[in-house]
Amino acid sequence: MATEPPSLRPMRPDEAVAVRALAKAAFEDLARRNDVTLGEEDAYDAEGARAEHIARTHPAGAWVEESGGGLGGAALAVRQEGVWGLALLVVRPDRQSAGVGRALLTQALASAEGAAGAIILASRDWRGVRLYAQAGFTLEPSMAAEGIPRDVVAPRSVREGSAADLELTAAVDRVARGGARAADLAVELANGGRLLVCEERGYVVVEGNRVETLAALDEAAAADLLRAAMAGATGNFELEGLTARQPWAVREVLAAGLRIAPQGPHLLRGDLGPFAPYLPSGTWL
């Protein structure tokens, strides 16, 4: 039987829940193929709100593929202040290796034209990594950390933040990652993210017991923010994005007794500043 060619169209904001379900199916299939146990599922309402926000505010980067009466794949990309990022690229298991992922990536990358820099946080699916490398992205190996933090005390330099501190996040992001993303981080806070701030030097967004993103102007501030996040953990703590650019983070998680293991790589293109001290967000890059 001939394979149905990809049929792409812009994603509608009201398809957010369907895209989230598609992503769940694709990542569960990937986990089975790699003999990996998935962590606790994220809340559907929060994930749906993120996807809806991207489709509504970044429409040039939000695309779906239709096949067999449903969604065969989806790509979500965000772009602010010259920094482009691929927030999601998933293909339904029965549509994989049929050109759907490549078609969606090509369409999403069109919204990166003229961007100073671009970011992709890949899964461990080698097919996706190959696509990104062929698109001119440079691979950087990455590790993840998890465990119950031991003997971690929250530094006095870190305080609770709020939406009033989004101007600070923007200023720090422009230095650490080459561009701000305050409007997207506002969605994160509205959906339960907790903001911690090191006055004038950096911030971290925490969701439950997981670091969503962290950026700072210096490694000392970044380390203080990470310790504050770990000190507030009430169970198994999770952290991603430990690359060779972030030795400060590796030191802190090892000192706190967390385990580290390989994860999907970071793939970068263009000018993103030092990209440090910085732990990117899987959604907002």
Image (spheres, rainbow, N blue to C red):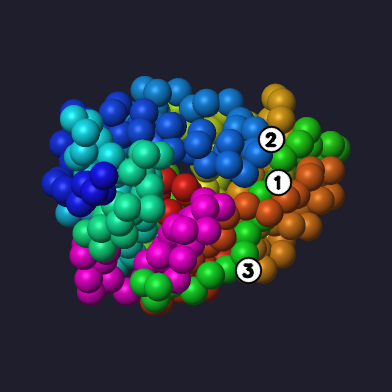
Indicate yes or no whether the magenta region holds residue 119: yes
Dot 2 lies on which element?
Answer: strand
User: Residue beneath label 1, please?
Assistant: 145
Q: Reading the chain from its start, which is encountered first: label 3 or label 1?
A: 1
In the image shown, does 96 or 285 lie closer to the viewer? Answer: 96
State the image coordinates of residue 72 (x, y, percent, origin top left): 28, 39
Q: Is residue 197 above or below residue 174?
A: above
Disc 1 residue type (three-letter) = Ala
The structure residue drawn at horizontal position 24% and vertical position 48%, both measured from the top left corner, is 2
Distance between the Cα atoms at labels 1 and 2? 8 Å
Q: Which residues are the magenta region?
A: 108-133
The structure residue drawn at horizontal position 25% and vertical position 58%, both measured from the top left corner, is 103
Say whether marks 3 and 1 touch (CB < 8 Å).
Answer: no
Distance between the Cα atoms at labels 2 and 3? 21 Å
The structure residue drawn at horizontal position 62% and vertical position 64%, both measured from the top left corner, is 141
Q: Residue 237 got which mark?
A: 2
Indicate yes or no whether the magenta region holds residue 135: no
Disc 2 residue type (three-letter) = Phe
Which quarter shows the C terminus? bottom left
Q: Quadrant of residue 165?
A: top left
In the image shown, does 10 or 92 lie closer to the viewer? Answer: 92
